[in-house]
């Protein structure tokens, strides 16, 4: 009984800081070479030369190195000017987004990927899974170069202490 109480206290000590309004989490699997080539596949593509955008729709999958992003709709914005012409500046994914790298995965309603800054901002019912652990929030900013993420907006977590799914006695 004392052992169970001690385990509960230890678990609460782990969970309490993560249940706060905002938290930082290690995101090592999402560390990414932002200079790596970007590959985009989709059912349809509409290019707008006037505003320098490309709209991919239907089963969109974007790959860069080990990272994969999937969404129903992704707007790609190209850099302007001679030095950046043809280079992707940012991507705006909407309609339910999944971001996967290694054993880590994140889901949200929207994701904005700023290639130059090396950040992905995910908003709307964010769910991050790392192995057997899960975190939820309203907003998550992933720094791909540092391999870290900042979650904000009523962060909640579930920490799986036993990966076998069987509790300790």
Image (cartoon, helix red, strand yellow):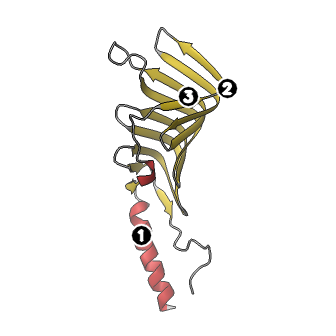
The mark tally for this picture is: 3
SS state under label 2: loop
Please determine whether, in this image, residue 105 is positioned above or below residue 169.
above
Please determine whether, in this image, residue 43 is positioned above or below residue 64.
above
Q: Are marks 3 and 1 in contact (CB under 8 Å)?
A: no
Instruction: Classify mark 1: residues with Cα within 10 Å, few (<14), some (14-19) or many (20+).
Output: some
- Whether residue 18 is visible here, answered yes or no, is yes
**Residue at 59% of width from left, 24% of height from top?**
56
Query: In terms of sequence position, does the residue under pointer 3 or pointer 1 come before the other?
Result: 1
Q: Are marks 2 and 3 in contact (CB under 8 Å)?
A: no
SS state under label 3: strand
Closest to the observer, 86 or 12 = 86
Query: In terms of sequence position, does the residue under pointer 2 or pointer 3 come before the other?
Result: 2
**Residue at 42% of width from left, 50% of height from top?**
151
| Residue 74: assigned label | 3
Query: In terms of sequence position, does the residue under pointer 2 or pointer 1 come before the other?
Result: 1
Closest to the observer, 71 or 153 = 71
Q: Is residue 58 left or right of residue 162?
A: right
Q: Which residue is mark 1?
A: 14
| Residue 113: assigned label | none
What is the CA distance from the residue labelled 2 to the residue labelled 1?
44 Å
């Amino acid at each position: 009984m004392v052992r169970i109480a001690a385990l509960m206290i230890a678990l609460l000590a782990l969970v309490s800081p993560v249940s706060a309004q905002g938290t930082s989490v290690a995101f090592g699997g999402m560390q990414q070479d932002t200079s790596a080539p970007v590959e985009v596949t989709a059912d349809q593509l509409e290019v707008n030369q006037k505003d320098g955008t490309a709209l991919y729709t239907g089963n969109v999958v974007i790959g860069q190195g080990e990272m994969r992003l999937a969404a129903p709709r992704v707007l790609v914005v190209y850099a302007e000017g001679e030095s950046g012409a043809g280079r992707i500046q940012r991507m705006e994914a909407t309609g339910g987004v999944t971001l996967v790298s290694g054993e880590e995965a994140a889901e949200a309603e929207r994701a904005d990927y700023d290639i130059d800054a090396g950040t992905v901002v995910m908003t709307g019912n964010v769910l991050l899974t790392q192995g057997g652990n899960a975190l939820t929030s309203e907003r998550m900013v992933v720094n791909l170069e540092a391999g870290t993420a900042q979650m904000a907006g009523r962060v909640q977590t579930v920490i799986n202490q036993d990966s076998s799914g069987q509790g300790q006695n």
